[in-house]
Amino acid sequence: MKTFNRRDFLRTSGAAALFAATPGLAYSQVVGGGGSFTDYRALVCVFMFGGNDSYNMLIPNTNAEYAAYAASRQNLALLQSDLLPISPASTGTPDFGLHPAMGGIQGLFQAGNAALVTNVGPLVEPTTKDQYFNQSVTLPPQLFSHNDQQDQWHSLRGNVPSKTGWAGRMADLIRNSVAGQQMATNASLSGASLFQSADETVAYVMGPNGPIQFEGFSTTPGDILNEQRLAFGRVVDAAYGSVYERGYAEVQRRAIDAADTVSAAIANAPTINTVFPQSQLGTQLRTVARLIAVRDELQMQRQVFFVGVGGFDSHDDQELNQPGLLGGVSDAITAFHAATVELSIADSVTTFTQSDFGRTLTSNGDGTDHAWAGNQLIVGGAVNGGDLYGSYPQLTIGGPEDVGGGRMIPSTSSDQYAATLARWFGIADADLDIVAPNLANFAQRDLGFMIP
Amino acid sequence: MIANRRVSLLASVLLGVAGCGGGGGGDTPGPPPPPPPPPVTKAEAFQFLNQASFGATESEALGVIAMRQERWIDDQMTKPASLQLPHMLSLPPPQFMGQLHTDRVDIWFRNALWGDDQLRQRVAFALSEIMVVSQLGALQARPFAVADYYDMLAENAFGNYRDLIEKVTLHPAMGVYLSMLGNEKPNPALNIRPDENYARELMQLFSIGLVQLNIDGTVALDGNNQPIPTYNQEIIEGFAHVFTGWTWRGSPSFGSGRVPVSSQYFPMEHWPEFHDTGEKMLLNGTVLPAGQSGEQDLADALDNIFNHANVGPFVAIRLIQRLTTSNPSPGYVRRVAEVFNDNGFGVRGDLGAVVKAILLDPEASPSMAMEIDGKLKEPLLRLTQLFKAYNASSASGRYPLVGSYILFGQGPLQSPSVFNFFSPFFAPPGEIRNSNLVAPELEIATEYLSTQYTNYMFFQAFGLNHTNENLDEDDIFINFQEEMEVAADINALINMVAGKLLGGEMSDTLRTEITGMLERIPETDTAIRAAEVIYFITTSPEYAYQR
C-alpha cells in the first residue's frame, strides 16, 4: 500500500551521495535541512482563470503612450479620463492608471502596500521578437493555450512537462522545518492544482468556506458514531487491488485526518470585522483570513493558499464584463489586506496574482483572444509597494514585443516573479533554482518587490 | 511498482487464458462451429452495465445475461433518444430564463435513470464531457439551447463523427459558449480580427489535440525525439476566419439583438456579408481558396479536421476513458482507432462502431484483472447507479438537483470551463503519477468534494428514504423496503445490498466492518440497518471503482 518515496530511498540506501552529486540539488536541501522557522509567513495565490486582459488593468497614462494604447485597442480601450492614476515611486509622476473598477488597489498602491510586475509570463530564456520568429531560443510549448500556459505558470518548467508546481516544491524543500504543522503547508480553496502538486508533500483541498466535517462521526468513546468513524476508517485503510481504489482511499484518509483538527481550529477563530464582498473570491479570501487567524492553534509557520476566480476568458462582451471581473478582484484583495491589518499580520502575508496569459491587444469585435505576457499584482505589508517592476512594453501593434495581433513577449519571466516570492517565503538562494528551474537563464534573480 | 500491462497480457496468452470476458467472440463465420461461449455471469453483466449505462441494476443484468453483450448493444442502438427539449417546451414560461436549468437537470436525470436508451444516454454524457458546453456562463440565460445541445449529442451518439462536429459547430449553444456566434470578418482599420476561441478548442479538445499521435494513441516524435505540434497560430487564424458569419437563426441583426426562443434550438444561420472571403490556411498544408461561400468554407474546414490522422486515436482515447478505463493499452487504442478509420464497410467516423469496439474489446472486460484496469466512477455515475438500484424518486416526480456541480463537483452540462470537470491527463501524486498513469476522475475527488459526496450519501441513506414522513415534495428519496424485510438477518441484508450495488462481489473488509456495525444496531431498527449498509457501500472505495 505505502509507496516507496524518495525520502525512504535516501534513508535506507545511503543514496544521498547521488543527490549531493546532482548540480543544484544539495543533499541538505533535498531532505530539508533541519532548523525551524522562527516566524510565520503566508503566500496567497489568486488565480484568475481564463486569462486576464491585464493591459486593461494597468494602462499607460502619459499622452503618447496612452495614444498608442488607444490606437491598438480601439473599441476595447478605456477612456483616459476614467483611469485611476497611480504614481510609481520610480518616476514620481502619474504615468500609469488602473482600471476604473480597481479603486481599492489604487489606494493600496499609493499607500505602498501594492506593486505590479509588468509584462511577465512564462519563458524558458530571455526572448526577443527576432529570436521568437527565428526559433533560435527555446520557447514554452503550446503558447496561447489555456491549460498549457496555466501549467507553465504553475510548474515553471517551461518546455518540460512537469508533475510538480512551484508551491509544491517549496513545501517539499521546507518540509522538515515545518514538521510540527497540523495542516499541510499547501492548502487550496479552489480545487486540486498543479501549482501545489509535489513529490513529498500533499496539498489539502478544502471548500470555499473551509473544511467540512463528516456527518455521522463522533470521537466520543463508546458512542456508536465513534464506532462508525473507526469502521469507516478501516474500510478506507484496507488493501485494494486497483490504483483507482487506492487513490480514492488516500483522499478519504486525508479528509478524515484533517477535517476535525482544522474544523475545530477554525470554529474558534476570532471574529474578523473586516467586511468581505459576497463573491466567490471574497468568500475564499475570508476563509483564508480565518485560517491565518488560527495559525498558532494549528502550529503553522509557512502556508501557501490557492484561491481562484473564473470568467476571465473574455472572448465576448469584454466591455460589459471587465468592470465586474477586475472590480471583484480589487474589492476582495483589498478586503483581505484590511483583514490581515486587523489581525496584525499584514507584514507576514503576501497576496499575488497569476493568470493563464495576457490577452491580445487587438479585438475580435467585442472581446480578446489568448496571448502571452501580462501584468500581475502583489499586495501585502512586506511588499515594496507603490511601484512597478519590470519593463512596460510599447502597446503598438507590430511593436518590438508584439508577435502578432498584440500578443506581447514577456520581458520578465514567471520564474523571476516566483523566485522573488519564494525568497521572501524563506527559500534559500541556492534552492530557488529548484522552485524556479529556469531562473538561472535570467540575470536578475530577485525583482526587488519584496522587503526581505 | 505496477505491473506492465503488456507483460501481463502476454502472460495470459502463454497461460492459455481466453482474453475475452464474453464479448466480441462468436461472430467469425467458418465451417468448424466455435464452442458456445460460457454464460455471462451476474458480475460480468454488472461490470458491463456500469460501462454502458447509468449504473447496473439486477433486472438489467438479467437482460445482458440473456442477450449477451453484443446483442444488447445492437438492441440499444435501435432505441430512439430520450429527449429533453420537448419536456422543456411543455413547461409554463418561467419568470427568469435561468430557472429552467433546474428543469433541464430534472429531465436529464429522468432520461439517465429511466430512459430505455441507456447506452445512448451514457455515450451522450461522455460526449458532453468531450465537446463541452456549460450552463455556467453565458448559457445561463439559454436553457433551451443547452437542453437541445444534449439532445443533439444523444441523437448523434451512434452516428458519424463528421456529422457530429458539424452539428456541434453550428449549434447555438456552442456558438454562444465558444463565441463563434457573431464572429465576423476582419476590420483592419479597427484592429479587429476573427475570434479564435472556437477554432482553437475545436482542434485542441474536440478532434485532434495538440500533438501528432500514432494510431495507437502514443505521441509521435520527430528526429530529435520531440512531439510534433498539430497546428500553429497561423492555422488557428485560418480556422477562425472560416468560422465567420454565423449567428442566431432569425436574428434581426448580425450581432446581439432580441431573438425568438426557437433560435436556441435551431442551427445558426449564415450571413454572407460578415464572412471573410480570403484564403485560409488549414491543417496539413491545405489552403482554402479565396472567394468561397461561408457554407463551403465550413464544410471544407470540417472535412480537413475530420480527415486528420489524429482523430481516430484521439476520439478512441477520450471515449475509452469515459466508458471503460483510464489507462488503455496502445493496443486497445489502436483497435478502436482502426474501427474509427474504417468500420469494416469503408466508412470513416462511425461512432456506433467505435462504441461497440470499445465495449467489446477484451481489455474492457479482462479475464485477469490488473491494477490499472477500469477507472474511478464519476460521482454523478455513483449517484445515478444508486438512484436506479433503489428507485429513487420524489413526491413531485422531479429530480431538481441543479446544484449538482456544487455538491459533487459535477453536473449535467455544468462544467466550470470547456476543459471539463477534470483533465484526461490528471495524475494524482503518488503511485499513479510515479507510474506514468492517469486517473482523470480523481481530479474532482478532492478531500472537500469526496467528503461532500460521503455526507450526501449519509443524508440519502438515513434521511432521504421512503420511511421518512417529513420529506418535501422535491426531496429525492430511495426505497429500501425489501432490505428492511430481511434486516433481522445480517448476512441476508448485506447480501441483498451487495447484490444490487456491487453485483454480488464484496471485499472481506467491507463485509466485516458492516457486519460489526449492524451488530450494534438492534434488529428491530430495520430502516437504520438498511441505511447503514447502503451508506457504507456507496461510500466505499470499491463502489467508487468501475472495473
Image (cartoon, rainbow, N blue to C red):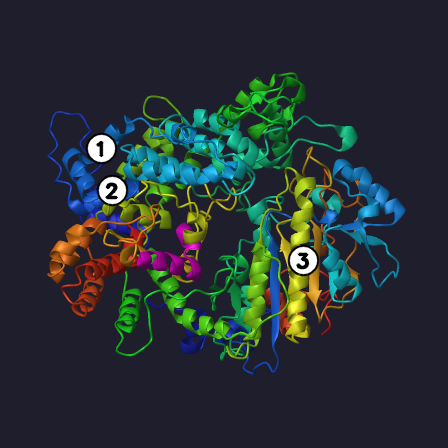
**Viewer-side residue, B520 vs A391:** B520
Percent from the top left, x then y, of residue B137? 55, 42
Vertical arrangement, residue A445 with respect to residue B394, above or below: below
Report the amino acid beneath label 2: Phe
**Viewer-side residue, B221 vs A311:** A311
* Mark number displayed over residue B72: 1
Q: Given contact means CB atoms under 8 Å apart, are the residues at marks 2 and 3 in contact?
A: no
Report the amino acid beneath label 3: Asp
Q: Say whether disc 2 or disc 1 marks the residue closer to the N-terminus.
A: 2
Which chain is mark 1 on? B
Q: Which secondary structure lies at badge 1? A: helix
Say which residue label 3 marks: A331
Q: Is residue A122 visible?
A: no
Q: In the image, is B322 to the left or to the right of B230?
A: left
Q: Given contact means CB atoms under 8 Å apart, are the residues at marks 2 and 1 in contact?
A: yes
Report the amino acid beneath label 1: Trp
Percent from the top left, x then y, of residue B87? 38, 30
Provide the residue span drawn in magenta. Answer: B439-459
The chief SS type of the magenta part is helix
Which chain is mark 3 on? A
Q: Residue at x 55, y 48 (%)?
A: A147
Q: CA distance from mark 2 to mark 1?
A: 10 Å
**Viewer-side residue, B326 vs B216:** B326
Within 10 angstroms of label 3, few (less than 14), some, or many (20 or more) residues? Answer: many
